[in-house]
Image: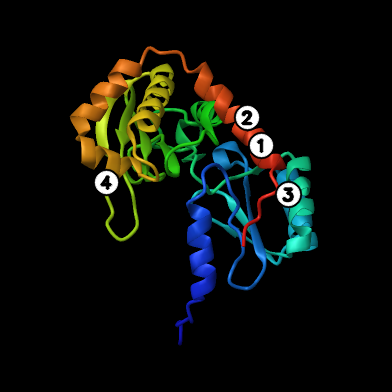
């Protein structure tokens, strides 16, 4: 079985340049010459109507829907002239259009104690609140969040920029993972804390990251440059600050993304 492929140097360079742009963006042009659209719902719990709508959208505009590791569905094979019509169909179906840019991504989670026999905490209400408050907030680099409601850690919380892991009496918080050629595992900075405190910690981590990171710097590299203790001190200092400004910025960014005329090369 031959799995080799010829690298498209021009497309790769164009994609790298797009990734340097701030704010939300779509996946852009793919190797087959078509475009992709990332869609989803909070908690990754699709209703029967969501699935029917997705089937219709894929049939009309795309070639296939691919389930991503981030609990989104990536609609592949969209023609350039159909992209904005497909995006509007996704929004009309009550689904999210998701960014893959320099911002806060959707929250990856497991079903938690509502369904899992091993669940220690319920995940869905917390995940929905985190998404509603912070998704699409601009950040120096992409920012991924994971929430696991049981010891099995199915959502891989130590492989996220901000990981939340259930304990018997609350939640443990980890920060600073990255993947790529030199993976870094997230480190614990707090816990156990209440669900309300999880929201405060995420707001404080995002505020510290936005203030202390260099341009285009992943949180893991900010921690490496400053040291975990220095960054944690900045987080603790910001814990009791209101985060209405972050929530408002995230809401505006979501609205802008749903209307932006940005496909890319």
Q: Quadrant of residue 135?
A: top right
Residue 185 is marked as: 4
Q: Secondary structure at mark 1?
A: helix
Q: Find out whether the residues at labels 4 and 2 contact each other: C-beta distance under 8 Å.
A: no
Q: CA distance from mark 1 to mark 3?
A: 13 Å
- Position of 171 compared to 40: left or right? left
Quadrant of image for the N terminus: bottom left
- For residue 184, say whether it is visible: yes
Q: Which residue is mark 3?
A: 87
- Position of 124 compared to 207: left or right? right
Q: Secondary structure at mark 4?
A: loop
Q: Find out whether the residues at labels 4 and 3 contact each other: C-beta distance under 8 Å.
A: no
**Camera-nearest residue between 112 and 59:** 59
Q: Quadrant of residue 192?
A: top left
Query: Vertical placement of 13 versus 257: above or below?
Result: below
Q: Which residue is mark 2?
A: 252
Q: CA distance from mark 1 to mark 4?
A: 33 Å
For marks 4 and 2 on the same chain, the one whose residue lies earlier in the sequence: 4
């Amino acid at each position: 079985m031959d799995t080799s492929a010829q690298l498209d140097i021009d497309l790769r360079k164009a994609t790298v340049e797009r990734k340097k742009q701030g704010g939300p963006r779509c996946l852009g042009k793919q190797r087959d010459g078509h475009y992709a659209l990332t869609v989803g719902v909070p908690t990754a719990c699709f209703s029967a109507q969501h699935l029917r709508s997705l089937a219709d959208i894929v049939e009309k505009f795309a070639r296939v829907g691919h389930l991503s590791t981030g609990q989104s569905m990536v609609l592949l094979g969209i023609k350039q002239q159909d992209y904005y019509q497909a995006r509007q169909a996704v929004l009309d179906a009550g689904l999210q259009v998701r960014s893959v840019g320099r911002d806060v991504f959707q929250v990856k989670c497991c079903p938690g104690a509502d369904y899992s026999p091993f669940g220690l905490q319920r995940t869905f209400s917390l995940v929905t609140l985190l998404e509603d408050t912070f998704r699409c907030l601009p950040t120096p680099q992409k920012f991924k969040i994971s929430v696991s409601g049981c010891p099995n850690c199915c959502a891989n919380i130590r492989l996220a920029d901000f990981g939340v892991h259930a304990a018997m009496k609350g939640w443990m918080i980890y920060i600073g993972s990255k993947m790529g050629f030199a993976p870094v595992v997230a480190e614990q900075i707090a816990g156990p804390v209440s669900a309300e405190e999880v929201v405060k910690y995420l707001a404080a981590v995002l505020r510290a990251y936005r203030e202390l990171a260099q341009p285009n710097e992943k949180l893991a590299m900010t921690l490496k440059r400053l040291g975990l203790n220095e960054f944690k001190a900045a987080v603790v200092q910001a814990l009791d600050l209101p985060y209405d400004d972050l929530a408002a910025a995230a809401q505006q960014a979501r609205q802008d993304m749903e209307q932006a005329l940005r496909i890319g090369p």
